[in-house]
Image (cartoon, rainbow, N blue to C red):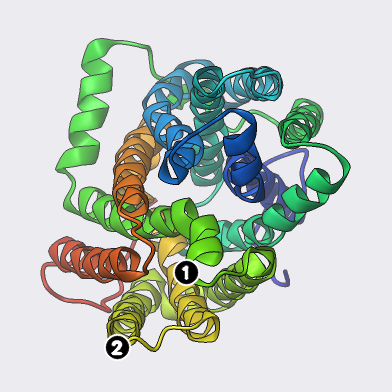
Amino acid sequence: MENAPPIPHPGLSYRQFVALIAALMATNALGTDAMLPALGQIGADLHIAHPNARQWIISAYILASGAGQLLYGTLADRYGRKPVLCTVLVLYCLASLSAAAAGSFTFLLLARIVMGMAAAGPRVLAVSIARDCYAGRLMARVMSFAFLVFGAVPMFAPSLGQIILLAADWRGIFIGLALFAAAVLAWVAAKLAETLRPEDRRPIQVSQILAAARFTLSNRVSLCYTLGMMVVMGCLFGFVNASQQIFAVVFHDPLWFPACFAVIAAFMMAAALLNARIVNRFGSRLISHIALLGFIACAALHLAVVLSGHETLWTFLAIQAPMMFCFGLLNGNFGAMAMEPMGHIAGSAASIQGFISIVGASLIGALIGQSFNGTLVPMTVGFLAGGILALASALAAENGRLFQARVVVT
């Protein structure tokens, strides 16, 4: 991480700051990806009849994490980032332990909803804290490095979950999630200084909340890139929801699932590393717009292969991996561009954007996942449609002109 920018956050070096941002985001991601190998075991243990119903263990968590994001930005803008962050990490630990003790599918889903609500906090606050300290291309660089570390989560989480299952049952995964959140909590409490400036604290007033929401939603760049991020994330969530079934039902080889998932995640991780190195030179728009066109091309190719009847495990991997590489170049840049005009209300804006993108993406992902019919047609159609909608959003944000750099006033 050479040529690190100046450090506007006392108590942490630049590397430590990026690692902490990544750890906060990983708290959310681990709650999704570590569970994937255990879905079959949970379904058998809790007597879940329909295989697609097991996807709600993932979807309920993601949906709740999106809904919860509306709350934390307002609280963080009033009380500061650190106290709110510590509170939600405690709640995440307690919810994880409750899930580990679940005796029914209903109770497990309730615990997962609380986990998701709590997991929303680290995601919103990670973006808010990064925006407190950096803006524009520098923020995109911070978030890209964070996604680089964060990329190791989906790369290793299913394997980690599988390893835990060798020594314990599915409940051990939830205990592991609680321990990870407790470690992050200790790190935040010991090292993170408050990043919200006193003059930027905002009272909790309905008029102020509505004003922040109005500004966030009326700004074309903010709204359009948030919607673009929503649809491409919905594609990813659709893949995650159905991934375990894809390997078990379509390819009849569930043992390959952790390894193939790791390869696909490695491509996302490589994209984040590349973006962090080149974003200052080429800009978020040029990189993400080219990546979006690549995403659409991969989705169209994948659909053609599936419809032709030539899909195999290896064609799946050969197309899905570069598609996720394009996603890795898209997501961080779209998020940074959506936040560009939001510096003075970073917490509220991150909440509103997170609510729209995650709730919308979880619903799109649930629709794709629940459409699983033993083939890859629903997923590939969803990916192509999502890419086209994201392109329409980017065109709307840029008045029909892609690849154009902007000057960001911070």
Task: Please identify the quarter of the rendering in which residue 379 is found.
Answer: bottom left
Res 139 visible? no
Q: Position of residue 151 (x, y in %)?
A: 63, 61
Residue 246: image x %, image y %? 49, 63
User: Which residue is at the front of the view, 16 or 369?
Assistant: 369
Which image quadrant is residue 46 in? top right
Residue 385, image quadrant: bottom left
**Do tag 1 and tag 2 residues touch (Cβ < 8 Å)?**
no
Amino acid beneath label 2:
Ser
- Residue 110, image x, y percentages: 50, 19
Determine the secondary structure under disc 1.
helix
Considering only order in the chain, which callout, 2 or 1, is on the residue closer to the N terminus? Answer: 1
Q: Is residue 223 visible?
A: yes
Q: Which mark is residue 69?
A: none
Can you identify the residue that label 2 sits on?
308
Q: Quadrant of the image for the N terminus? A: bottom right
Decide if residue 379 is on the left or right side of residue 94: left
Say what amino acid the circle numbered 1 marks: Val
* CA distance separating discs 1 and 2: 15 Å
Residue 99: percent from the left, percent from the top? 64, 23
Query: Which of 377/20 is in front?
Result: 377
The residue that appears at 81% across and 45% down in the rendered structure is 164
Return the residue found at the far right. Answer: 167
The residue indicated by pointer 1 is: 250
Above or below, 40 against 286 in this view is above
Q: Please tell me which residue is depicted at 70% across the width and 18% down the height of the picture.
A: 101
Which residue sits at x=27%, y=63%? 382
Work out whether residue 71 or residue 349 is closer to the camera in this orientation and state it: 71
Q: Residues within 10 Å of mark 1 (few under 14, many from 20)?
A: some
